[in-house]
Image: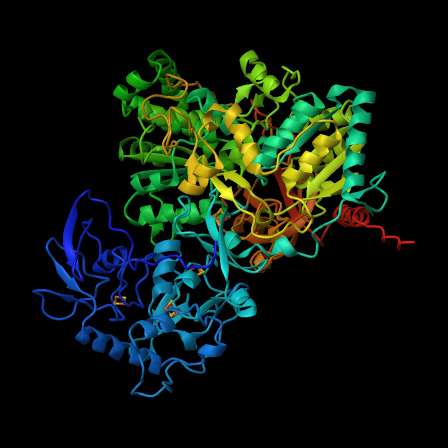
């Protein structure tokens, strides 16, 4: 793609009413949806009206007066951005009088603007320049020395963009973008008239303000007043490639704007159906890790983890890997090796890794990081609805009347979706939040939850059953829906179960700590408030009853008829960018792609025919079982692509012991991560900027990832997997990921209609996309559940074995923060550390006071599993008795203290409930210091011998 800006139609599309009006613009007769502005109608007709304060990402404001038009029969000159089209209207956009008026307006702007265009970073990419040209400005009668804004200091506090008030034309596009698009309300226009100026929060600098650095204001700014530092340093881009963010499951698409091979900026793509032109700080700005000096670009091997790494050629590394895997299998048997696929890699790469294991290793010992996040979603939704995926697209939230968020913190974890959700809440939808923490959604500017149920960690099932109790006993269920769409007998069994008095809000109040009347009110609102949609995250799944909680959510949605149309549904907010895709692609040890069990003869036969080998019908080992088998001496080799299980998985000591017991640990990653401390082979990985492929987001939306630069390590990850496969004797010959997708489509019924040509043409597809659903499936289960009748499952509350007591009186729960991502391997190598340089322990003021702790003190955090040290953050965001931390920094090793308890159905670890004690400390523990030393030793790379 060569560089052209996306067209800006000036105002957003009209809210659809289904009606259109016909009018004449500059002699052309056009029909437009009712409510469209004259400006947008003209733009869509190919006639651009000059504008400054209007842009199509925000509602029109009508302040600059540059967009005046003439309308027959109307006095004066209405602003085209604020005037809607009317049947029979006759509009003229270019007349002598209009030209004169526009030049007059532009003269005023220019007289108060520093005319240093030739040295301005936005030269050639500035709307003020463009519009001065468009109105034919040739002279400025008032001179060029307007002093209003000149000489004001720049605000360069934000690591990614600058604010230069002298270039500001006070169009307020930034203010409106912050309010309407992002929903943070961090900006205001201070003062009036010539004294007007943009101000962040209460006159703070951007970094110190409430700004979350989403960049919407920078994108909206028509001048160089708000501009990316990288553009200032590099110059304006000269080409653009549309690709998909590699951070979270929202799946924002961007124009990667390039100058040669250098990425200049990421601009959210307006046509992106997941993000609709918006992004968060990570996707827009935190991509510098791709060129970070820590990246390992050459393959390395070593005989033992105590030796320094030795850089070798790709050929030697691949041959060594293949020899080691073959040697281990010959000595310890077919089942002694396995692998882990990556939810950060593309669908095609993930598919190849599981194929390598099934076809090449001859077993099903493959698992993925979804094991530790959303495996209960797969299990629970598959049991109840018949499909292991969320039911809606993101746009659906705009039709919800009631939004129930449980165990999720979208403003930090899924920020772009959170902005959309907040927009709907500002329009009047009601919000219920079920979460132990007072997350931002509970109360933020112009958003306040109707009900916040701050339950004790570990009591989700009891809470959801109590909500169901109210729905059933107060007869708020949707009998017609249940009779038509679900199994009525199963419903009755479930209804009897939830109706038991022991499951009432009053009975469970001592368990959950939540006022029963509040629970009753929330249940009534959910059941009777109109379209009700549930969104949930890892606060639901990462529990010993994770799968039960997912099924309890599904029960509630079915009982109230809130499935199968827009505005409702059950929506897991997926963590990593491609966790949905990794699950879809057959990364679980019991399933082929498309969630078909390995014991199913017909499915297995299909794969056997395609791959020319006999496949194992026994499910393989899950990650924790691989580690157990390793410590038992039965599992000796593993290929880990793009996952850092030592940092991300529970009970770090156990993970370390498992890895240390293996004879060949192969890690493929961008950086020497924590797991690589135990590796014998390191294969450098490629970033999302360096390869083609697809990711599938939380809406089941398959989107293109496109190569924008040459891989620094020489190969895309799919090519490296192919090299390993061929070295162990497979005969793969993929030349492009599109060929892998062809194989996926041929072998996976839900992907049958997916191919790169369609993705290029249509932008994205939501699976199932096949003959039964040729256009894809934005909303699932419309005419019936995928499994036939929806299944109500009785979900008895079983308290976790992890109990508080005198030694460990507090409950620890973990999560993530906006600026960082998962184990932080990428974001810690960007300027995002400006917001979150370390993991902190959130503790309620009363708990802190009881322990003599102050904000910022070092504290020891102890559980039955282990101990770590970090600094305290005293805050009322957590309830008394609950503490919270993130796990983005390896120095903290938060998972040293999480336990081995896991979900009964899927082994998903119980990250969200650990009984702990907190006490004052002097700083990092001996263990942490020793660990840091060991990690340093393990990362040594031997100097390269000079050539003879
Ligand atoms: S970067 Fe985002 S949050 Fe910050 S001021 Fe701009 S629009 Fe608001
Ligand atoms: S900073 Fe940019 S967008 Fe904001 S008011 Fe000034 S010129 Fe307009
Ligand atoms: S991290 Fe998520 S919300 Fe942020 S830009 Fe990337 S996909 Fe979008
Ligand atoms: S663009 Fe219409 S008034 Fe500014």
Instruction: Give the left or right position of residue 724, taking residue 56 as reference.
Output: right
Viewer-proximal residue, 669 or 444? 669
Viewer-proximal residue, 23 or 361? 23
Residue at the image point whose x is 34% and y is 88% from the top = 143
* Residue 774 in which image quadrant: top left
Q: Position of residue 182 (x, y in %)?
A: 40, 54
Instruction: Give the left or right position of residue 148, taking residue 859 as reference.
Output: left
Q: Residue furthest left?
A: 73
Viewer-proximal residue, 319 or 819? 319
Instruction: Give the left or right position of residue 486, taking residue 408 as reference.
Output: left
Q: Is residue 256 above or below residue 75?
A: above
Q: Is residue 875 above or below residue 18?
A: below
Q: Is residue 378 above or below residue 188?
A: above
Q: Residue furthest right?
A: 948
Q: Is residue 643 visible?
A: no
Q: Position of residue 752 (x, y in %)?
A: 46, 27
* Image quarter for ligand 1: bottom left
Instruction: Give the left or right position of residue 212, taking residue 913 as reference.
Output: left
Q: Quadrant of the C terminus?
A: bottom right
């Amino acid at each position: 793609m060569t560089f052209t800006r996306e067209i800006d139609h000036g105002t957003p599309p009209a809210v659809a009413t289904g009606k259109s009006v016909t009018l004449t613009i500059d002699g052309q007769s056009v029909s437009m949806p009712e409510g469209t502005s004259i400006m947008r109608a003209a733009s869509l007709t190919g006639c651009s009206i000059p504008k400054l304060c209007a842009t199509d990402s925000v509602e029109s404001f009508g302040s600059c007066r540059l967009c005046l038009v003439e309308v027959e029969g109307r006095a004066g000159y209405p602003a085209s951005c604020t005037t809607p089209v009317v049947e029979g209207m006759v509009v003229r956009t270019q007349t002598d009088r209009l030209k004169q008026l526009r030049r007059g307006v532009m003269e005023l702007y220019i007289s108060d603007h520093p005319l240093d265009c030739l040295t301005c970073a936005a030269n050639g990419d500035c709307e003020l320049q463009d519009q001065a040209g468009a109105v034919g400005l040739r002279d400025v009668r008032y001179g060029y020395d307007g002093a209003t804004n000149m000489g004001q200091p720049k605000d360069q506090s934000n690591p990614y963009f600058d604010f230069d008030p002298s270039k500001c034309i006070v169009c307020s596009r930034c203010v409106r973008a912050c309010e309407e698009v992002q929903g943070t309300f961090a900006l205001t226009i201070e003062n009036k008239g010539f004294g007007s100026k943009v101000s962040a929060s209460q006159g703070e600098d951007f970094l110190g303000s409430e700004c979350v650095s989403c960049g919407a204001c920078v994108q909206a700014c028509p001048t160089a007043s708000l501009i990316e530092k990288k553009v200032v340093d590099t110059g304006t881009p000269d080409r653009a490639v549309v690709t998909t963010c590699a951070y979270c499951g929202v799946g924002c698409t961007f124009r990667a704007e390039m100058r040669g091979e250098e990425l200049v900026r990421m601009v959210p793509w307006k046509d992106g159906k997941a993000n609709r032109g918006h992004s968060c700080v990570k996707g827009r700005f935190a991509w510098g890790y791709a060129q970070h000096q820590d990246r390992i670009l050459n393959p390395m091997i070593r005989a033992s983890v105590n030796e320094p790494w030795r850089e070798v050629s790709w050929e030697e590394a691949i041959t060594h890997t293949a020899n080691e895997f073959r040697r281990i299998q010959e000595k310890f048997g077919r089942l002694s090796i396995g692998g882990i696929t990556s939810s950060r890699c593309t669908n095609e790469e993930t598919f190849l890794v599981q194929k390598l294991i099934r076809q090449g290793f001859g077993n099903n010992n493959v698992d993925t990081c979804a094991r530790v996040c959303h495996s209960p979603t797969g299990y629970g939704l598959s049991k109840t609805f018949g499909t292991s995926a969320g039911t809606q697209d993101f746009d659906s939230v705009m039709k919800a009347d009631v939004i129930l968020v449980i165990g999720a913190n979208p403003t930090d974890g899924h920020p772009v979706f959170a902005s959309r959700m907040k927009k709907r809440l500002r329009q009047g939808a009601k919000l219920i939040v079920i979460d132990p923490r007072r997350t931002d959604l509970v109360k933020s500017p112009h958003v306040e939850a109707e009900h916040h149920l701050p339950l004790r960690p570990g009591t989700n099932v009891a809470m959801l059953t109590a909500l169901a109790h109210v729905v059933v006993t107060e007869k708020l269920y949707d009998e017609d829906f249940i009779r038509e769409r679900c199994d009525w007998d199963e419903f009755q069994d479930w209804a009897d179960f939830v109706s038991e008095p022991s499951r009432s809000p009053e009975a469970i109040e001592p368990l959950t700590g939540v006022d029963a009347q509040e629970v009753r009110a929330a249940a009534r609102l959910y059941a009777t408030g109109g379209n009700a949609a549930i969104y949930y995250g890892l606060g639901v799944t990462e529990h010993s009853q994770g799968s039960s909680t997912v099924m309890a959510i599904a029960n509630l949605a079915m009982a109230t008829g809130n499935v199968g149309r827009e505005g409702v549904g059950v929506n897991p907010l997926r963590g990593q960018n491609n966790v949905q895709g990794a699950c879809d692609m057959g990364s679980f040890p019991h399933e082929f792609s498309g969630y078909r069990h390995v014991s199913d003869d017909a499915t297995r036969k299909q794969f056997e025919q395609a791959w020319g080998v006999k496949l194992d019908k026994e499910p393989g080992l899950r990650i924790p079982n691989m580690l157990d088998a390793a410590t038992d001496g039965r599992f000796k080799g593993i290929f880990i692509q793009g996952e850092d299980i030592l940092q991300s998985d529970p009970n770090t000591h156990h993970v370390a012991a498992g890895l240390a017991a293996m004879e060949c640990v192969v890690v493929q990653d961008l950086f020497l991560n924590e797991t690589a401390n135990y590796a014998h082979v390191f294969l450098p990985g490629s970033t999302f900027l360096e390869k083609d492929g697809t990711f599938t987001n939380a809406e089941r939306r398959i989107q293109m990832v496109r190569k924008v630069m040459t891989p620094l390590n020489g190969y895309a990850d799919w090519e490296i997997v192919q090299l390993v496969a061929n070295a162990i004797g497979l005969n793969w010959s993929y030349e492009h990921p599109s060929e892998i997708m062809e194989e996926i489509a041929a072998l996976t019924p839900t992907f049958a209609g997916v191919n790169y040509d369609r993705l290029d043409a249509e932008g994205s597809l939501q699976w199932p996309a096949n003959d039964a659903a040729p256009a894809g499936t934005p909303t699932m289960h419309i005419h019936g559940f995928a499994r036939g009748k929806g299944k109500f499952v009785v979900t008895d509350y079983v308290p976790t074995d992890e109990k508080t007591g005198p030694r460990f009186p507090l409950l620890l729960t973990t999560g993530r923060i906006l600026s960082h991502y998962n184990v932080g391997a990428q974001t810690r190598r960007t300027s995002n550390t400006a917001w979150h340089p370390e993991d902190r322990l959130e503790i309620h003021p009363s708990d802190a006071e009881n322990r003599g702790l102050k904000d910022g003190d070092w504290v020891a955090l102890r559980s039955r599993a282990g101990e770590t040290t970090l600094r305290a953050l005293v805050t009322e965001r957590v309830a008394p008795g609950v503490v919270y931390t993130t796990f983005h920094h390896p120095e903290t090793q938060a998972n040293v203290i999480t336990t081995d308890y896991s979900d009964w159905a899927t082994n998903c670890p119980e990250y969200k409930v650990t009984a702990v004690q907190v006490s004052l400390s002097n700083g990092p523990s001996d263990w942490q210091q020793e660990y840091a030393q060991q990690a340093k030793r393990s990362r040594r790379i031997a100097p390269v011998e000079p050539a003879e």
